[in-house]
Amino acid sequence: MQRTYASETKKKVGQQVRLLGWVNIRRDHGKLVFLDLRDKSGIVQLVVNPKVSAEAHKTASETRNEYVIEVEGKVNPRSENNINSDLETGKVEIEVTKLAIINTSKPMPFDITSDTRSVNEETRLKYRYLDLRNPRMRKNLQLRHKVINFIRNYLTDDGFTEVQTPVLTKSTPEGARDYLVPSRIYPGKFFALPQSPQQYKQLLMVAGLEKYYQIAPCFRDEDARADRSPGEFYQLDLEMSFVTQADILQLIEQMYSRLVETLLPEKKISQKPWLRISYQEAKEKYGNDKPDLRQDKNNPNELAFCWVVDFPLFTAQTEEDFFHGSGNSIWAPSHHMFTSPHPDDIPLLDKDPGKVRGLQHDLVLNGVEIGGGSIRIHDPKVQEKIFDLIGFSKEQKSQFAHMLEAFEYGVPPHGGIAPGVDRFVRILAGEEKIAEVIAFPLSGNVRDPMMGSPSEVSEKQLKELHLKLDLPKKKK
């Protein structure tokens, strides 16, 4: 008999069905045993009556919560008094004729049927595969899937090509600290995990692809932040050629508005078209560059999108600026070193760099920056000028030699944006923490309690990589 999912049973009254899943809750009433069977689609109630099958009833008496079972039985309508309006299948139940235990389960380390947000983080992440059995967590992952699938279909229909860029790349001074991967074949040399596909997507524009995107993993060796998963996060990476800033903003605005209307019709976008605010106005009027424009901040279904534009191209460089302390200039890029200056302000690069505006755009939702992008520099001379202004040494410039050389072969004007997937889905799901919408996040102290990583490796592995560890001596 073909398998039936729990959610399908409501349409099969009077039919024989076969179901597979977990025992969500077991209730033994003596003569009758009630089991709630859970599968990926939902929950349905099983009724095991010894008068129908003594053997099934005996097996049901041996089951416990989270046992994996296989059942066959007839779908019956529930009486009016027994309808469960909280369940999608609450109007039916399965009269069990056959029941088999496929696998047993130890008692759960915490109750997965209630809200697991109250459970200690270390415990939840150690047993993440159990935490993900929780209906809320399953719903969050399904929402994440639907959001990514919608984006993929929308952009594909609009002529974009999805391209997977390398995960092993070159370490360049782009912002955060790189995760480094030592090379076995080239002793003393390292790959880096990409902080973003920034350089690759610009090179794809040089290649003539014109419309590129991917759901890209990004890796940054930084401390935990409330709005970003430590170590690894995902973004919608997108780049286009022959576009203006307005073209990029319009594309994202239309796509995200359609996404909300299609997937989450109960949510309302507070203003259309989305408000576009200059950086200066945002700071003066709201006190920050990511204003929360919701009319009612207690309304979880209100989505207030806005754009913040006209950022200064440069900020004052600090002692610990993100270019690894180059210390050769008073300037650091406000966004990144590939952001194009406003065309009207290019003469100011020589006269007064602090007054130069950048063609940067930040996407803000409910007071959270969920994405950023810009029109990129496509003139190698302007790019060299920016490198000089931010104090890059000859050695640092040489790390971008591949980009400067590529720009000598007919690079088109181009720009893009990279909205964060995790941040966006967190807000749509109404979650406080970004880890609630990620399948296997790291903990706040940048560890994976489930896998036990990071972990030590063998001396043999280190020797193959020509590495020796210089660790503090352990106290006796």
Image (cartoon, helix red, strand yellow):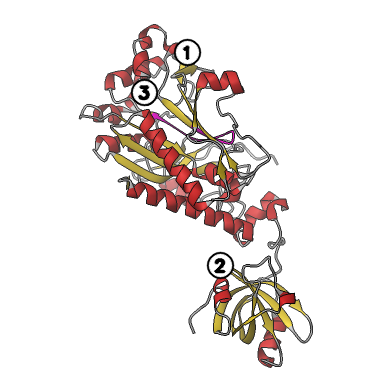
Residue 216 location (% of width, % of height): 42, 44
- Whether 178 is drawn above or below 214: the answer is above
Dot 3 or dot 2, earlier in sequence? 2
**Residues shaded magenta:** 363-374
Residue closest to the eye, 389 or 261: 261
The picture quadrant where one finds residue 296 is top right
Residue 234 shown left or right of residue 303 in the figure:
left
- State yes or no: residue 436 in magenta: no
Q: Is residue 372 visible?
A: yes
Query: Mark 1 = which residue?
Result: 330
Dot 2: element: loop
Nearest the camera: 270 or 305? 270
Q: Which residue is mark 2?
A: 41
**Separation of residues labelled 3 and 2 (CA atoms):** 48 Å
Q: Give the SS element for disc 3.
A: loop
Look at the magenta stretch and give its main secondary structure.
strand
Report the mark closest to the observer, 3 or 2. 2
